[in-house]
């Protein structure tokens, strides 16, 4: 199957939610507002803090309509200082106004949540939204760090193919004064084939607002999973799931400014583009992928001009 025909076939499966394509995912869940006393229970309670006034002053662009946004899988952030140091070491990152982080964790035995610690070191506000509990009395989830107020935060439980841990999407509005930036933060499952990945992604983006930025770790590797367990790595571009996801997002009216970013992750000597950023109704300019930090992923950034 050629790359073009693979794109068409996988997108067609996703557009019908996987029906008839051999995909068995749980039903999509609605977006649910997140509050510190939300209905997910104490163990999965969201956590937040506002930005420092100095951060707003130093990172606010002229006119308040342009903001630099970073997406970064921090690989559990076991050393928040190392994550903060990596960000501060890269001139393109240390002046960014919004960070969408994946694979954040928090543990009761630690005095601070890891998100709170990174945010404190950078002088930013934050919201941490857990997806699931993990061993050791902890939680695992997504976070947004911002120099600007983070408002209207919601969580969606993504469809589950029974191949990994529960996954969520997180959406919020970044309040830049006269402008609002709607963002969706994603961390998709690893052990998904192409059509499954689109069906997993679809609920979070299908009805997104006309003006939206979507970003995160989509785990779009050059792998097909045999029986959902055994990875078969291919050298053929026909197996590059990033191409299929880009095509699907374009069909929904999104631009794909990071399509030619190059790899964002290195593991066992193999480099792949697992992370992406998509925009709709926004003027964006691709920035780069900064090869810094302790994670197996590298942070990616773009500049966004709001209408």
Image: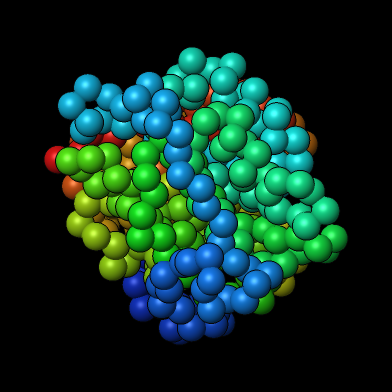
**Quarter-of-image position of residue 10:** bottom left
Which is more toward the observer, 26 or 98?
Answer: 98
Task: Give coordinates of residue 179: x percent, y percent.
Answer: 20, 42
Figure quadrant of the C terminus? top left
Task: Give coordinates of residue 155: x percent, y percent.
Answer: 47, 66
Which is more toward the observer, 273 or 165?
Answer: 165
In this rendering, would 225 be left or right of 110?
Answer: left
Q: Answer above or below: position of 163 versus 2.
A: below
Residue visible at 27% across and 24% down in the picture: 61
Residue visible at 43% across and 47% down in the picture: 215
**Quarter-of-image position of residue 210:** bottom left
Instruction: Please say whether residue 51 is visible from this viewpoint.
Output: yes
Which is more toward the observer, 223 or 170?
Answer: 170
Residue visible at 38% across and 21% down in the picture: 58
Number of dots carrying numbers: 0
In this rendering, would 264 be left or right of 213?
Answer: right
């Amino acid at each position: 199957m050629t790359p073009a025909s693979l794109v068409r076939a996988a997108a067609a499966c996703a557009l019908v939610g996987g029906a008839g394509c051999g995909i068995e995912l749980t039903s999509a869940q609605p977006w649910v507002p997140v509050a510190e006393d939300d209905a997910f229970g104490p163990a999965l309670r969201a956590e937040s803090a506002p930005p420092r006034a100095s951060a707003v002053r130093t990172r606010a662009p002229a006119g308040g309509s342009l903001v630099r946004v970073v997406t970064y899988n921090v690989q559990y952030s076991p050393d928040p200082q190392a994550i903060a140091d990596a960000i501060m070491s890269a001139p393109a990152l240390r002046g960014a106004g919004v960070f969408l982080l994946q694979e954040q964790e928090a543990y009761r035995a630690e005095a601070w949540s890891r998100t709170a610690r990174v945010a404190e070191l950078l002088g930013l506000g934050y919201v941490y939204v857990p997806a699931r509990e993990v061993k050791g009395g902890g939680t695992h989830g997504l976070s947004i760090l911002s120099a600007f107020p983070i408002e209207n935060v919601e969580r969606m439980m993504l469809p589950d193919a029974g191949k990994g841990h529960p996954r969520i999407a997180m959406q919020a509005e970044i309040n830049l004064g006269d402008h609002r930036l709607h963002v969706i933060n994603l961390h998709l499952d690893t052990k998904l084939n192409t059509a499954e990945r689109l069906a997993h992604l679809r609920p979070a983006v299908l009805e997104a607002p006309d003006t939206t930025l979507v970003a995160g770790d989509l785990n779009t590797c050059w792998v097909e999973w045999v029986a959902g367990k055994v990875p078969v790595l291919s050298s053929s571009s026909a197996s590059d799931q990033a191409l299929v996801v880009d095509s699907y997002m374009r069909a929904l009216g999104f631009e794909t400014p990071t399509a030619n970013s190059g790899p964002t992750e290195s593991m066992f000597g193999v480099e792949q583009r697992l992370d992406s950023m998509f925009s709709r109704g926004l003027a964006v300019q691709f920035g780069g992928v900064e090869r810094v930090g302790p994670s197996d992923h590298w942070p990616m950034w773009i500049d966004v001009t709001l209408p």
